Image (tube, rainbow, N blue to C red):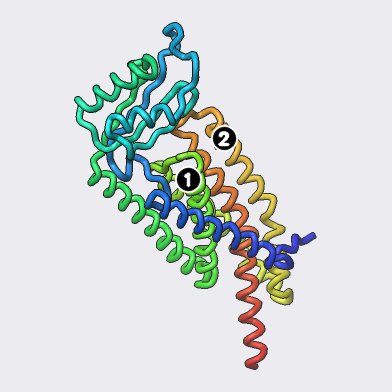
Amino acid sequence: MAFNVTKQRNFWWTVSALLTIGSILAMVISWFTIQAPLRPSLDFVGGTRIQIELACAKKNNCEKPLTTAEVQVILDEEGLSNSSVQVLDKYTLSVRTKTLVEEQRTKLLDTLNQKIGTFDPETSQIDTVGPTIGQELFRSGFLALLVSFFGIAVYLSFRFQRDYAFFAIVALFHDVLITVGVFAVLGLIAGVEVDSLFLVSLLTIVGFSVNDTVVIYDRVRENFAQTPELSVDEIVDNAVSQTLARSINTTLTTLLPLVAIFLFGGTTLKYFALALIIGFVAGAYSSIFIASTLLAWWRGRSHRTKIVQA
């Protein structure tokens, strides 16, 4: 039995339109709030990041959890009011400031030790990135994303036809935009920052999504050749039905380890895994409900135009 995905295409398109518009609005709000569509990490803007953890082995040192408010007061007193503060768990703190020299870092750490509690020096992490390096990293990552889109468009144009390639790229933009939109919201609400791993996740999402779309398009092309007597919608519905189990199984088996990484992988990999989870779900959705239905609509429209002209 065929899965009639084309019959409800207006519904699928409406869902995607709402998600993409919401993503764009989130980025616009973020721009007016923090002057960036996403909250950039140290990797992109440069500066100093200090991550410290209270030494709970010391008696009475962890009686109360850390709060961003009390840390921000200390930073304001130190002339670092524009700094970003995150409490990673109850007793671990991440502070991102402008670039600090060694004396400034030492003074800040001493002040935090005196006013908040003793921090464990063995777990302390201090990173400094120059603004030039951060900007170059962003440009390189963004260029890699553009090159991947261009390469995919060229490949699909040769393997299929230009309309296949165009709608596959539309689906890819859809997946990337939704992922970016979610992180724009997280940046505004929870202070989540995007780093170089986020760009890696976007490139991975693009590769996963286009692979799923190619499988469906390959079956669509075969069905056009084998059952030319069927309507365009029927051909696409059959192609989606024939590949649906494969798409769902591939997505689920990929998501399982990602969910495990998100839950147990630590702070560094947590949001990398989350970006992949969002992007892979969006990619599976767009391959089935967006790329295929857009192609069916376009091919059906072109077929009707030819009949009228004849």
Dividing the picture into quarters, in which one does residue 11 lie? bottom right
Which residue is found at the position 54% from the left and 49% from the top? 279
Which residue is found at the position 67% from the left and 88% from the top? 307
Q: Identify the disc placed on residue 280.
A: none
* Residue 40 locus on image (x, y percent): 38, 45
Left or right position of 153 against 108: right
Please tell me which residue lies in front, 192 or 240.
192
Label 2 sits on residue: 257
In the displayed structure, would residue 94 be above or below residue 166? above
Left or right position of 14 against 111: right
* Residue 182 locus on image (x, y percent): 52, 48
Q: Amino acid at mark 2?
A: Pro
Label 1 sits on residue: 188
Q: Amino acid at mark 1?
A: Leu
Please tell me which residue lies in front, 51 or 216.
51
Separation of disc 1 and disc 2 at Cα?
Answer: 28 Å
Quarter holding the C terminus? bottom right
In the displayed structure, would residue 10 be above or below residue 273? below
Please tell me which residue lies in front, 113 or 132.
113
Disc 1 secondary structure class = helix
